[in-house]
Amino acid sequence: MIRARAVAAFRERLRGRLVGPEDASYDTARRVWNGRIDRRPALIAFCTDEMDVIASVCFAREQELVAAVRGGGHNVAGTAVCDDGLVIDLSRMKSIEVDAAGRSVRSEGGVLWGELDRATQAFCLAVPGGTDSDVGIAGLTLGGGNSWLMGLQGATCDNLLAADVVLADGRRVSASSTENPDLFWSLRGAAEILEL
Ligand SMILES: Cc1cc2nc3c(=O)[nH]c(=O)nc-3n(C[C@H](O)[C@H](O)[C@H](O)COP(=O)(O)OP(=O)(O)OC[C@H]3O[C@@H](n4cnc5c(N)ncnc54)[C@H](O)[C@@H]3O)c2cc1C
């Protein structure tokens, strides 16, 4: 049970849209790539920016709800949706900034591989990403990432330079080899060999 007043306050705080079972778009909004997944979240927050993500994480914590994050929604097991909890949907967060001189790209969590490829190819650059253009960049990178370019450039997670992360307590931190390196290590699969 989520209190109606708490939902109303959350809706007020969000810049994006909040969808629940009473909305006509609910069945479309809870769908993921694997059509056999049939989970019924209590609420789906379509975030538009970082502040929406922070508000969603805080709401889930305060209301003691299970939370699931959805990027491209391609995880076959459907881990981007949950029953009775809050889905934090990033599909509207599409910003992409290519730094051609620095040979890097910065993008938000709702970007798909086809969208990232289109932006980087304009500068004759490519990130080793998925072979399917509809897969989300975040989910694939967090899972390691196999690509056509893997033999040349390694896995996608090997090419991750930094990430902005919203922690469970709602704090936003940066992770890279110099800032919160342990968190960065875990985002890259925690697979590096440790020096003993
Ligand atoms: C058709 C198809 C083709 C594929 N091709 C490839 C391929 O070529 N190479 C490859 O390596 N893999 C491939 N995969 C596997 C794919 O990488 C994984 O399914 C990946 O989890 C999908 O990421 P997503 O963002 O689309 O999915 P989602 O289902 O949205 O997310 C996957 C998981 O990551 C979490 N997550 C997503 N974004 C965030 C975020 N910003 N913060 C925290 N958690 C987050 C979600 O909560 C979920 O648990 C493919 C899958 C499919 C279905």
Image: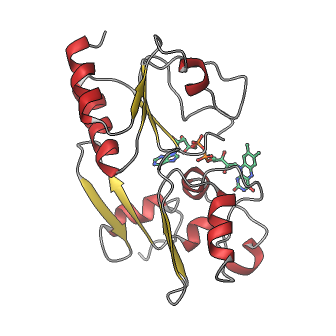
Between 193 and 92, the residue placed more toward the observer is 92
Residue drawn at point x = 23 percent, y = 43 percent: 169
Looking at the rendering, in which quadrant would you find the N terminus?
A: top left
Taking 193 as reference, is 130 above or below it?
A: above
In screen coordinates, is 51 left or right of 112?
left
**x, y percentage for residue 187?**
46, 59
162 over 11 or under it: above or below: below
On the picture, is 96 further left or further right than 54?
A: right
The answer to whether residue 76 shows anywhere in this view is yes
> Which residue is at a point 59% across and 18% down the rendered structure image?
27
Give x and y (percent) for residue 149: 75, 73
Q: Quadrant of residue 123?
A: bottom right
Q: Residue furthest bottom?
A: 101
**Residue 121 in the image: above or below residue 113:** below
Examine the rendered structure and indicate whether residue 5 appears above or below residue 55.
above
Report the colour scheme.
Answer: secondary structure
In the rendered image, the quadrant that contains the C terminus is bottom left
Where residue 113 sits, quadrant-wise, is bottom right
Q: How many numbered badges does the structure rendering display?
A: 0
Residue occupying image coordinates x 46% and y 10%? 22
> Which residue does the image show at 40% across and 41% down from the upper left?
47
